[in-house]
Image: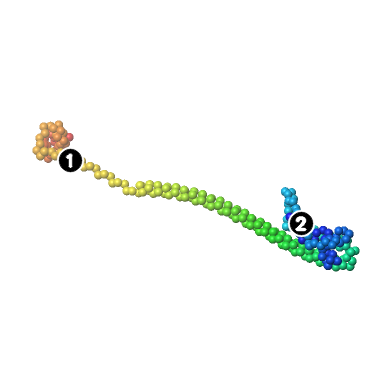
Amino acid sequence: MTESSLPAAGWYPAAHADGQPRYWDGSAWTDADSATVPVVVQRESSGSDAAPSFLQRPMMRRTGLIATASALVVGLLLGGGVGGSSAQSEVAALEDQVAALEIDLAGAEGVASENDAALADARADLEDALADLATASEALTTATTQMTEMETAATASQSELDARAARIADLEGQLSVRAAPAPAPAAPAPAAPAPAAPVSAWYDNCTAVRNAGAAPIRVGDPGYAKHLDRDGDGIGCE
């Protein structure tokens, strides 16, 4: 619901009443006087009839002002016969009112233009911010992808380094085994000494010499005798 302080239809400034509003019934002025009667206009909004936007209001105000001024002028023309020469002063007063209303209307339109410019600037700033956000998001996605690739490459490199370290340790172990000095061969066990022949011995034959482990028996050996050395070469029981 909207309320206007404009005069109601039929009420016009009357010259005989010092410019005070009087009701014109179409043929004569009435004696009734009244303060400015508010005109109440009620709109019923529905789903298909939404309230006018801020940018539409100046045009609606312009239409209302023109309609009101036209009604006032018509009233003056109709009452010109009664008011006589005072009609010119009433027209001048109405023109002043219309001029003042036009100034107010121009101011409202200027405010609307400023609001339109501010709205356009805000939309441009919003679009710039959205573009910056999209760029930053894309850069973050790229950086995350690169970081993942670098981590994967680092893991693969570490695995390769571990494998190389294990191989080097194995080769060093093999080299250490090969470089170790070979153990010295064990000294042969000394041969068991031959049993010493008795200082004085007598052998009946070579069989006895062999059984005693004294064969061959030479000249000077205990138990040597000519009957043991048949060829006389000094070695018996050959």
Mark 1 surroundings within 10 Å by alpha-carbon count, few (fewer than 14), some (14 through 19), many (20 or more): few
Name the quadrant containing residue 111: bottom right
> The N terminus appears in which quarter of the rendering?
bottom right
Callout 1 amino acid: Pro
- What residue did someone put label 2 on? 40
In front here: 60 or 130? 60
Callout 2 amino acid: Val
The answer to whether residue 127 is left or right of residue 87 is left
Looking at the rendered structure, the secondary structure element under dot 1 is loop
Name the quadrant containing residue 109: bottom right
Q: Position of residue 116 (x, y in %)?
A: 72, 59
Residue at 20% x, 41% y is: 191
- What residue did someone put label 1 on? 193
Farthest-out residue, front: 31
Q: Is residue 109 visible?
A: yes
Name the quadrant containing residue 132: bottom right
Q: Earlier in the sequence, mark 2 or mark 1?
A: 2
Farthest-out residue, left: 200
Q: Position of residue 53 (x, y in %)?
A: 73, 55
The answer to whether residue 220 is left or right of residue 97 is left
In front here: 52 or 227? 52
